[in-house]
Amino acid sequence: MATVSANKSIIFDLDGTIWNSIIYRIKAWQLAFKDYGIDTDPEVIRLMIGYSGSMLIKKMNARDPAIEKREEMYFEKMLPDVKFYPDVEGTFSQLRNMGFKIAIVTSSRRDMIEKINVHAEAIVTMDDVEKGKPDPEPYKKAIKIMDGTPERTIVVGDIDNDLVPAKLLGCVAVLVSHGTQKRAEHKDYEISEIGDIIKIIETLKWR
């Protein structure tokens, strides 16, 4: 008897991967820290985008968890200006036509995600797990929702923090650079734009 293959699944990070939000996140964090009398280096903040807010606050040697709420307040005001990268919608359509289920895994809170127009078979936020990235728990949850397996799951992210848990689980790890120079030690492939993921899939020859 022939065995049935598991679903083909693909997981996308949100900030900086499919959503062009990094400059707005940096500005929101700078404003939030400034309200608490803390000067910040935007480059340090940029490197911490994708980690939890509590980790970023700790990195800045700050202690007040209310800073994260202040950042969310500023970022929410910027939401109308934040856009998805132009090839995201078309690529998602292609992926579904190829039989893929799509998940979004993000370090953002669920109430923030509900304010933007994103559609996926699974959405896992920091509110849905006990441990966020780089722990593999969010990816495990997304894969389970999609009835997939790590071996037939692709993970696309813009920093190593997205790719480390992918490699731990045995997923295919893809770094997207969006034309900037990025370093990631745990990537299997690197693409310049989201639409380039189609070429990677063709080389995998999954059925």
Image (cartoon, rainbow, N blue to C red):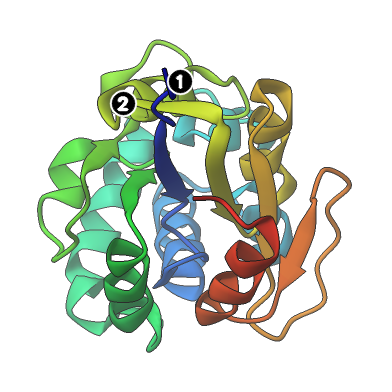
Residue 66 x/y as whole percent: 32, 31
Which residue is painted at 72% across and 64% down in the image?
43
- Pick out the residue farthest to the top: 130
- Quarter containing the N terminus: top left
| Side of 175 where 119 appears, left or right | left
Amino acid type at image mark 2: Asp
Q: Quadrant of residue 148?
A: top left
Residue 206 x/y as whole percent: 56, 51
Q: Which residue is mark 1?
A: 140
Which residue is painted at 59% across and 63% down in the image?
201
Q: Which residue is mark 2?
A: 147
User: Under tag 2, what secondary structure?
Assistant: loop
Q: Quadrant of residue 183?
A: bottom right
Residue 68 seen in render? yes
Residue 65 seen in render? no
Residue 23 x/y as whole percent: 50, 74
Give the mark nearest the N terminus, 1 or 2. 1
Residue closest to the eye, 158 or 10: 10
Residue closest to the eye, 126 or 89: 89
Vertical position of residue 2 compared to residue 162: above or below: above
